[in-house]
Image (cartoon, helix red, strand yellow):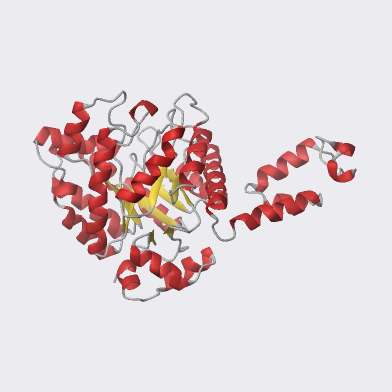
Amino acid sequence: MTQLEAACQGIITPAMQAAAAYEKLDPEALRQLIASGEAVLPWNKLRADRTALAVGKGLTTKVNANIGTSQAYPEQAPELEKLAVALKAGAHSIMDLSTGGDIDAMRRRMLADCTVMVGTVPIYQVLVDATQQGKNVTQISADDIFAGIEKHCRDGADFITVHCGVTQAVLAALEKQPRVMGIVSRGGSFMAAWMRHHALENPLYEQYDRLLAIAHEYDVTLSLGDGLRPGCLADATDTAQLMELMVLGQLVRRAREANVQVMVEGPGHVPLNQVIPNMQLAKTICHGAPLYVLGPIVTDVAPGYDHITSAIGGALAAANGADFLCYVTPAEHLGLPAAEDVHHGVIAARIAAHAADIAKGVKGAGEWDIEMSRARKALAWDSQIKLAIDPTRASNLRRARNSTDEECCSMCGQFCAYKQ
């Protein structure tokens, strides 16, 4: 029985109990959200115990951190360090996007060590494995794709990104309305290349029931990937993006009918004035499914600072419907992130998520800020640091900029408003 089946039958599972406790929410309320499809609880039945967290309507906005090996950096140790850094910084989810080294070993180690939900993108490994066997994209079969998906599910992935919405009709629309940057999704570009070569429909769309059967067997949540997400502001909210979204809306319904939990991935680069309309469209077209967004990044000209551009977009997105923010690090568009980049990315996304939770009136969100305000008024520095979203950085800055016995800070000193 999947979490969705249990919820629809009125059963509150232990995972639901734990996830509701995290939210300070009545378990019955969470059960109803899962039953309606407005929330998901990624919880592969084969994976060892970890923190149960739900994603969706009225819940705290969750933050995901992407890590993983690459061909240039195939070693596991640095990625395991990043895993520890991401968890310490407060990430609610980790995605393993490994494309180099021993991918199976990396994923299995991450699943064993990670204390929160883990997602993967199986198509990445399918492509890497084929390349190592001397094949190109066109020589990969539909059976190869589904075998790769099942392997990740069998290993314990709680959710998987699958690019089911890149259909022949969507690609035809893209050809009629060319983009500045074309297809920027790795998974989307792979599916498009495969489809164009074989002149066949996307097997993940055409054989969607086969995918649902695998997901149901392991109780894996499907994250319907946005293979046509815009890679620059000029391409945002175009025909291809919206056509793919329409396809995903249909697939959301089919997943729910099959008792498979499902969420929908959102756009990447979006002008600030289009963020809210994008969230509203996605929620409406996809029947209230939890929305998982990358950023959105609201300007293209800030390499090295895209954790900030994405936090701006993420706060606005989450305040208007997004439920799950995928972090962006300062290294985005430049290279593989280092551990420090991972830390900055998680903190920036958590700030965006918390700001949105205050705006949405999520239970307990505003109280945190009230506590901080009271500590500031009282000049209670230890309490302020303890309440900070990044206590280590707050403590370091406090020590570096003030004498050890200074009651006020070095900005105002004796002229502090609370000392007058």
- Residue 270 place in picture, x, y as percent: 41, 33
Q: 387 or 399: which is nearer to us?
A: 387
In the image, what residue occupies the spot 48% across and 32% down? 331
Residue 45 in view, yes or no: no
- Residue 382 place in picture, x, y as percent: 76, 52
As drawn, the residue found furthest toward the left would be 199
- Residue 61 place in picture, x, y as percent: 49, 52
Q: 339 or 382: which is nearer to us?
A: 382
Is residue 269 placed above or below 156 in the rendered structure? above
Q: 152 or 196: which is nearer to us?
A: 196
Which of the image's four quarters has the N terminus?
Answer: bottom left
Count of picture labels: 0
- Residue 179 place in picture, x, y as percent: 28, 25
In the image, what residue occupies the spot 22% across and 40% down? 166
Q: 343 or 290: which is nearer to us?
A: 290
In the image, what residue occupies the spot 82% across and 36% down? 410
Is residue 46 placed above or below 287 in the rendered structure? below
Residue 408 lies left or right of residue 159; in this view the side is right
Which of the image's four quarters has the C terminus?
Answer: top right
Residue 207 in view, yes or no: yes
